[in-house]
Amino acid sequence: MINAYQTDIVIRHIAGVLDEWNERGANKTEGIRAHVVYQTKLVYNLNGEEVSSPIQLLLKPNQTITHKDRIELEGEGFTHPIINIYNRRHLSVEFREIFLEG
């Protein structure tokens, strides 16, 4: 069901692994299908603070994504940090809701 709404392609910049000197390795990129919603909402970040998010992504629940990753939207040359990730369910449809910083 959520496949019908996933009409946008976003690029996930996977955070590199920390090496022995506590420096990040090279980032990898991956293109994923998502539904991008431009609507400002108040959400909680990982510290429990209430912040506003102007961008929301809807993904399949089996998409692996972490808070360390960054998202590049189509047509933009920069990446957005992830504020929070929620696993949601609407009737029998499961999906991930991801909020980005503007």
Image (tube, grey):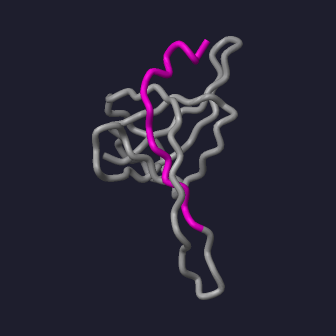
Q: Quadrant of the N terminus?
A: top right
**Residue 65 location in percent, x, y?**
60, 46
**Residue 93 location in percent, x, y?**
66, 16
At horizontal 37% and vertical 34% (from top left) the residue drawn is 41
Quadrant of the rendered structure where residue 59 is? top right
Residue 101 relative to residue 27: left or right: left
Quadrant of the rendered structure where residue 90 is? top right
**Residue 45 location in percent, x, y?**
49, 50
At horizontal 45% and vertical 43% (from top left) the residue drawn is 11
Q: Would residue 52 be counted in the magenta stretch?
A: no
At horizontal 36% and vertical 48% (from top left) the residue drawn is 101
Residue 11 relative to residue 53: left or right: right
Q: Is residue 41 above or below residue 89?
A: below
Residue bounds of the magenta highlight: 1-16
- Observer-nearest residue: 38 or 51? 38
At horizontal 71% and vertical 13% (from top left) the residue drawn is 92
Q: Would residue 15 be counted in the magenta stretch?
A: yes
Q: Is residue 21 above or below residue 54?
A: below
What count of labels does the image hold? 0
**Residue 56 location in percent, x, y?**
42, 33
